[in-house]
Amino acid sequence: MDITKKTFGQSAHLITLTNQQGTTLAVTDLGARIVSLTFMGRELILGFDSAEEYLEKDAFIGATIGRTAGRIDAGKFTLDGQTYQLPVDPATGHSLHGSTPSFEEKIWQYEIIDGEQEATVVFTTTSPDKERGFPGNLSVEVRYTLTEDNIWRVTTKAVSDQLTLFNPTNHVYFNLSGDVTQPIDDHTLWVNSQTFAALRPDSIPTGEQIEVTGTPFDFQTPTKLTTVFTSDFPQKELFDGIDHPFFLKDTGLDKTAASLLSPDETIKVSVRTDASSIVIFTANFGEDTPEMRGQRLANHGGITFETQIAPGAERYPSFGDISLVPETPFETITEFKLEAREEQDR
């Protein structure tokens, strides 16, 4: 595995792993973030060329999100009879992604492990007690691994010294066309999910789990995303696209949770995870999109697979449990398998 390091601005570094097939994974210690993922000579994800651009334009893109991914209603939650108040976004009155700035703007410590069949960048940080309003001193480790068989693996571990909430994810956006000026309309999506979480107009889950069958959110058979964007489905109309948690029928690294096929049907990304849901966001930015690597990002120019427990779990136990018990190790793993079409056809 070829490994290179260089400066990335703002005291950050860029580490690039390249396997024998020429697949590259570039990550930075700013936000324990994926910056680039190339396969078959094509860039597959959204990203910027410097740390400054992430901080100025969108610090969530590609970043490790925490302590809690998604929105918390009014920034309030209760643990063991005690109510906690997080900082909220003045525009919405809610907490987003652990209340910013958080994991996405930290400079993490890192080390590189070069193995025979894979290489790993191990990022670590500590979130002190009461940071952004959360209880407990929290130690976090995020491992980004590239294998020789073209798997990008994300392993997140943590331990807290107090009862707290923890529900991390990675905020990568895929666009398999390699052209960020092209929306993802003609990408084909499959998701192993029968239900999704309904949202209020302010993006907070209502607690209701809606069957996807008969709706444009049904991806139980491979479906082009244009089906969603051209629909008048009320949940789509609220956000001009998808920004919803999908509850997975099966979990585990031996099962595919979702897959995305490029418009030219030459590249496929398959997602496997031990998480119980995937938040799918179709980059519903409207005309307010950033310039990215010299080109203007299209509306609907990317799609996320935010593997996690569904946001809202702090209020709706049916979504899952995001409480982290003191001194109890947390671990979650998600894999993204990259395949060329000719490999699938064999």
Image (cartoon, rainbow, N blue to C red):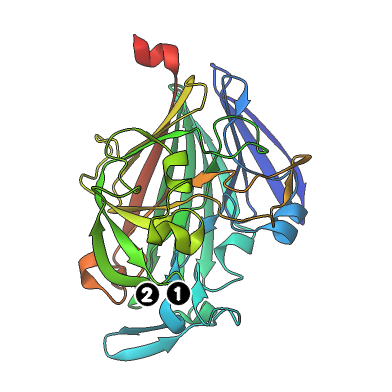
In what quadrant of the picture does the C terminus appear?
top left
Q: Check disc 2 and report the residue beneath it.
A: 161
In what quadrant of the picture does the N terminus appear?
top right
Residue 343 image offset from top left, x and y in percent: 40, 13
Q: Check disc 1 and report the residue beneath it.
A: 137
Is 106 rendered above or below residue 214? Answer: below
* Residue in the foreground of this view, choosing between 298 and 133: 298
Q: Amino acid at mark 1?
A: Asn
Residue 31: which quarter of the image? bottom right
Q: Is residue 106 visible?
A: no
Mark 2, secondary structure of its residue = loop
Q: Amino acid at mark 2?
A: Asp
Crowding at mark 2 (Cα within 10 Å: few <14, some 14-19, many 20+): some
* Residue in the foreground of this view, choosing between 59 and 228: 228
Residue 296: which quarter of the image? top right
* Sequence-first tag of 1 and 2: 1
Q: Kindly check if marks 1 and 2 are in contact, taking CB atoms under 8 A apart as contact.
A: yes
Who's the residue at 49% across and 79% down the image? 94
What mark, if any, has residue 119 been given in the picture? none
* Residue in the foreground of this view, choosing between 166 and 210: 210
Specify whether 82 is left or right of 174: left
Crowding at mark 1 (Cα within 10 Å: few <14, some 14-19, many 20+): some
Residue 115 image offset from top left, x and y in percent: 47, 28
Q: Is residue 22 visible?
A: yes
Q: CA distance from mark 1 to mark 2?
A: 6 Å
Who's the residue at 49% across and 61% down the image? 239
Residue 101: which quarter of the image? bottom right
Residue 91 image offset from top left, x and y in percent: 60, 79
Is 206 rendered above or below residue 19? Answer: below
Who's the residue at 32% across and 77% down the image? 163
Is 73 rendered above or below residue 51? Answer: below
Specify whether 2 is left or right of 148: right
